[in-house]
Amino acid sequence: MDPTGLQRRRFPRFHTSLAATVYVGTKAVSAHISQISRGGCLISPPLPAQETSAIKLSFRLAEDVGPVNCIGEIVYNISDLGTGVAFTEISLYNQDLITEFFSKQPAAEEAAGS
């Protein structure tokens, strides 16, 4: 079984470096997004074990772009890699914003195995 979900991805992932806030219940945790697609992202540091796999995420693609707020589900957690999150509630507008933003970047590079 592939723990990173490379075989199941439906959308290309892009390398990035975005600050994010992850909300687990009432607790807010600062995190870093290193890969993203319209369907999910890879965050680090890895999140500690949770009672529930549901989380809320908030991040900005750029300073002049409004925040992306969504709900996700933890699909894997690897200590030396990070936490893989599948977006479960994200607006079509925000999905398109992610795809268009990275497609237009001069150095847009798809992550390996995307």
Image (cartoon, rainbow, N blue to C red):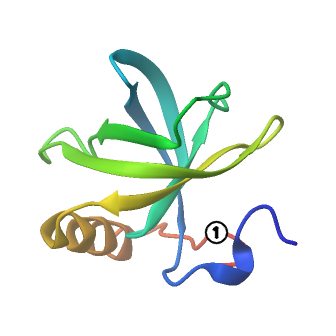
Q: Is residue 14 left or right of residue 49?
A: left
Q: Is residue 89 left or right of residue 42?
A: left
Residue 61's x, y, as percent?
Answer: 29, 49
Q: How many labels sit on residues?
A: 1
Q: Residue at x 47, y 61 (%)?
A: 40
Which class describes the residues within 10 Å of circle 1: few (<14), some (14-19), or many (20+)? Answer: some
Q: Residue furthest top?
A: 27
* Residue nearest the observer in this picture, 73 or 5: 73
Query: In the rendered image of this protein, does residue 102 appear above or below residue 80?
Result: below
Residue 51's x, y, as percent?
Answer: 57, 30
Q: Residue 38, located in which quarter of the rendered image?
A: bottom left
According to the picture, the residue beneath numbered tag 1 turns out to be: 111
Query: In the rendered image of this protein, does residue 105 appear above or below residue 72?
Result: below
Query: In the rendered image of this protein, does residue 91 appear above or below residue 69?
Result: below
> Which residue type carries mark 1?
Ala
Q: Quadrant of the C terminus?
A: bottom right
Identify the element where label 1 is drawn.
Answer: loop
Q: Residue 111, located in which quarter of the rendered image?
A: bottom right
Q: Is residue 79 left or right of residue 52?
A: right
